[in-house]
Structures are given as structure tokens and as C-alpha cells.
Image (spheres, rainbow, N blue to C red):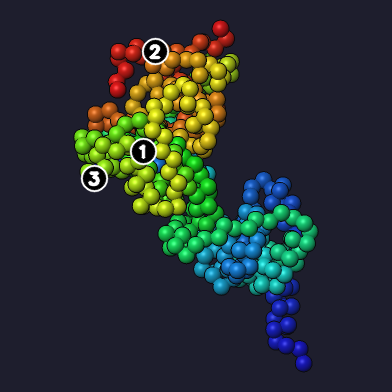
């Protein structure tokens, strides 16, 4: 049952994004505890030094194509 | 002897604010917030073209429906018809409901077209679609306009498993026009306890085909693109580029980092879901508006710790 709850929440977020309605879970992590029957939302913030989306990030398509994600997912630290 | 109607029209007109189409155009283009523009004509008139962003409430339904669409009574509400007559009476009706700024557009849609302003021609619905989406049409947050957006939308699903199954079914039921489904597995009997898009009769089929069978039967408006491959560094960018939103149902770190990097580069949102024992999590990674996966998990775990 738990995958159903989470998958349907994902579908709901997709519909909201397409319609441009409501507050999607951007910067928020929604958790559902099936045993306790509780939902919680945690705020999550951006990392200004993120190697993918930070101000100094230099991630590009050729870098993605050349990486072997099965071996390592590490990106060079921004600014290197 | 003057008709009673002419007297009535003149009396009503004196008490209603009117502006021309130029004023409406600049209110739409320059206003701080989008103005409420209501088209009060009949359906066949609306279907031949309307002011972009206008809402369709035929004159006969105006009093019944306006308060759902425009709850704030002090908001300006622009009303237009074909030539500026019906909208005068419509504005009077709104005044009687307490709207303080009900404005009739003089010259109506005819003047709008004559001025050379752009107009939208709404999607033509088949009788089946009118029935299928009738509940959506009644919800102000969706409506015919929103349903059109859903049918034009392209969603890429990573995995047709535990999370992807219910997500695909609800997206298909809602009328999302194109679902790309990436999965390299075949249906196994042990999947059926939770992967509800598959079925006993389709054990052994590729999950992409099994999901397509179910979705096509649920809603023939939905185009399913089955991608019977593993997501990897050489196909991820081309796949993601064709879609508006990505739904991740794959539960491994490599896929999450790979998908994240492609979506940051291409500016596409990921709706991520995961399950660990009895707890589930959902979040949306929208590039440059919120954190990405790497913002939250900068350090990939060693390969032998990553759950599969
Ligand atoms: Zn980031």
C-alpha cells in the first residue's frame, strides 16, 4: 500500500506543476510514516556551492555523457 | 413609440462602467496581476475564438458561477460579448451580486478582432472527452484550459514499478497526453503485490508493454512511449529533453545523480519519491528554484552501501 500512497502523491505534484496551481513540494520534503499514520514536511534549502546548480557550477552535457555513474557519481567541486 | 427594451438598455448602460478594447489590452499586458476577463457569449461563439486568458461563462450561467471563479468582490472584472450589449447587462448582474468593479467592454470581441489583437481558438473536445473530463471541467483550478494543458503535457516516468505504477495510472486517468516510461525489466509474479499497472496475464512481458496495455485501456487519449532500456549517461539527456516533467520511481543512487544532473542542465523538474521500510518520502527538485538532489546529498555513498 505504501508505494500507492507515495506514487499518487508524486502524480499529484506532477499535475500541480503542469497546471501551475498550488504550492508544489519545491524546497520541501514530505514524509509519510505508515506505521504512525503521520505526514510531516521538512524545509530543505539550496546549497550555494552545489557542484550541479550552485553559482560556480560548471556542469554541462559532455560531463554527464563522460561520467560512469555506476562507478562514481562525484562531480568536481565547484571552483576547481 | 420606443420599445421598452431600448429604454431598459439605456437605463442600465448609464449605471455601468465601459472601457474600449485598447483599455482591456493594456490591463492584460501591463496590470500587476492578471485581470479577470469573462466571455459571456454562447459556446459556439467562444469556440470560434476568444480573448487570451478569458474565462468562459455564458450569460445564462453568470450569476450561478461567477462567485466560484472570482471570489473577491473588489477585483476588476472585465466582461465582453460579441458587440458590447450583452456584457452591459452582465455587468449590471455582477453589480447586483456586489462586484464593485464590473466593467463592460464596448464593441466586444468584434472590436478586439478589428483592432488586430491576438485571440485564442479553444481546443475542440469530442463528446467522449467532454464526458471523460467533465469533473475536471467543473473544477476552477483545472477547467477546459487546464485539461488542455494536461493533454499537451509530456511526462517521463523512470520505472514502472511500485511508485511508477500508481503514478502512471493517475496521470493517465487525468489525461496527461504523453507518458514516456523507462524500464528495462520484465513483469515478475513477485511484482504484482504492489506494482498495480501490471497483471497476472502479462507476467514475462516487458514492463513498458504491460504498462502500455493498461494505460491504453484506461484512457486512449494518452500516448505511451515505452523505452525498454536502462537509463544511462548516454541516453538520459536525449530522453529528458523531450519531456516537461520527470517522475522518478527508481530506487538507486546512481540513477538519482544521473537524472539530477541531466535535469539541472535541461531545466526540468523531477518529482522524486522513495520508500524505506514503512516510511515514504516525496519532494520536487525544480532547478534553480529549489534545491537539487546534489544540494541535499552532496556526497555519493560508497557503491557497496547504496541500496538497490
Ligand atoms: Zn544543487
C-beta proximity under 8 Å, tags 3 and 2:
no
Q: Is residue B197 left or right of residue B248?
A: left
Q: Is residue B12 left or right of residue B60?
A: right
Which of pointers 3 and 1 lies earlier in the amino acid sequence? 3
Residue in the image at 42% along x and 26% along y: B231
Q: Which residue carries the number 1 mark?
A: B208
* The CB of the residue at mark 1 lies under 8 Å from ligand 1: no
Disc number lying in front (2 or 1): 1
**Residue B190: x, y in percent?**
20, 35
**Residue B108: x, y in percent?**
71, 66
Disc number lying in front (3 or 2): 3
Q: Is residue B250 above or below residue B102?
A: above
Q: Is residue B206 above or below residue B295?
A: below
Where, quadrant-wise, is the C terminus of chain A in this rendering?
top right
Q: Which one is nearer the viewer's eye here, A12 or A68?
A: A68
Q: Quadrant of residue B249?
A: top left
Residue in the image at 55% along x and 63% along y: B66
Q: Which residue carries the number 2 mark?
A: A71
How many angstroms separate mark 3 from mark 2 (CA)?
A: 37 Å
Secondary element at tag 1: helix
How many angstroms separate mark 2 from mark 1 (CA)?
A: 27 Å
**Residue B268: x, y in percent?**
52, 32
Q: Which one is nearer the viewer's eye here, B1 or B290?
A: B290
Q: Which residue carries the number 3 mark?
A: B201
Crowd tier of the residue under label 1, counting other residues whose Cα lies within 10 Å: few below 14, some 14–19, many 20 or above: many
Secondary element at tag 3: helix
Crowd tier of the residue under label 2, counting other residues whose Cα lies within 10 Å: few below 14, some 14–19, many 20 or above: few
Where, quadrant-wise, is the N terminus of chain A in this rendering?
top left
Amino acid at each position: 500500500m505504501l508505494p500507492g500512497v507515495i506514487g499518487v502523491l508524486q502524480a499529484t505534484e506532477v499535475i500541480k506543476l503542469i497546471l501551475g496551481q498550488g504550492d508544489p513540494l519545491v524546497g520541501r520534503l514530505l514524509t509519510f510514516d505508515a506505521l504512525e499514520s503521520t505526514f510531516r514536511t521538512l524545509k530543505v534549502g539550496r546549497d550555494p556551492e552545489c557542484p550541479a546548480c550552485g553559482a560556480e557550477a560548471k556542469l554541462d552535457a559532455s560531463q554527464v555523457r563522460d561520467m560512469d555513474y555506476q562507478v562514481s557519481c562525484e562531480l568536481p567541486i565547484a571552483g576547481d | 413609440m420606443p420599445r421598452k427594451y431600448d429604454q431598459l438598455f439605456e437605463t442600465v448602460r448609464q449605471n455601468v462602467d465601459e472601457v474600449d478594447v485598447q483599455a482591456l489590452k493594456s490591463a492584460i499586458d501591463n496590470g500587476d496581476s492578471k485581470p479577470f476577463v469573462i466571455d459571456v457569449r454562447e459556446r459556439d461563439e467562444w469556440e470560434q475564438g476568444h480573448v487570451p486568458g478569458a474565462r468562459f461563462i455564458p450569460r445564462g450561467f453568470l450569476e450561478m458561477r461567477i462567485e466560484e471563479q472570482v471570489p473577491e468582490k473588489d477585483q476588476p472584472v472585465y466582461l465582453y460579448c460579441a458587440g458590447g450589449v450583452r456584457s452591459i447587462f452582465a455587468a449590471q448582474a455582477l453589480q447586483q451580486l456586489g462586484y464593485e468593479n464590473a466593467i463592460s467592454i464596448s464593441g466586444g470581441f468584434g472590436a478586439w478582432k478589428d483592432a488586430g489583437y491576438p485571440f485564442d481558438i479553444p481546443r475542440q473536445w469530442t463528446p467522449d472527452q467532454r464526458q471523460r473530463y467533465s469533473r475536471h471541467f467543473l473544477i476552477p483550478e483545472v477547467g477546459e484550459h487546464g485539461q488542455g494543458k494536461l493533454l499537451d503535457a509530456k511526462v517521463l516516468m523512470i520505472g514502472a514499478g511500485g511508485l511508477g505504477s500508481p503514478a502512471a495510472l493517475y496521470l493517465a486517468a487525468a489525461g496527461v497526453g504523453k507518458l514516456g516510461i523507462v524500464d528495462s525489466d520484465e513483469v515478475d509474479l513477485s511484482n504484482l503485490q504492489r506494482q498495480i499497472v501490471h497483471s497476472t496475464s502479462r507476467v514475462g512481458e516487458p514492463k513498458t508493454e504491460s504498462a502500455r496495455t493498461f494505460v491504453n485501456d484506461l484512457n486512449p487519449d494518452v500516448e505511451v512511449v515505452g523505452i525498454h532500456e536502462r537509463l544511462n549517461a548516454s541516453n538520459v539527456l536525449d530522453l529528458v529533453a523531450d519531456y516537461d516533467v520527470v517522475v522518478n520511481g527508481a530506487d538507486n543512487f546512481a540513477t538519482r545523480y544521473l537524472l539530477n544532473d541531466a535535469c539541472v542542465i535541461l531545466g526540468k523538474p523531477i518529482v522524486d519519491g522513495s520508500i524505506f521500510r514503512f516510511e515514504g518520502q516525496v519532494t520536487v527538485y525544480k532547478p534553480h528554484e529549489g534545491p537539487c538532489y546534489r544540494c541535499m546529498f552532496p556526497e555519493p555513498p560508497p557503491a557497496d552501501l547504496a541500496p538497490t
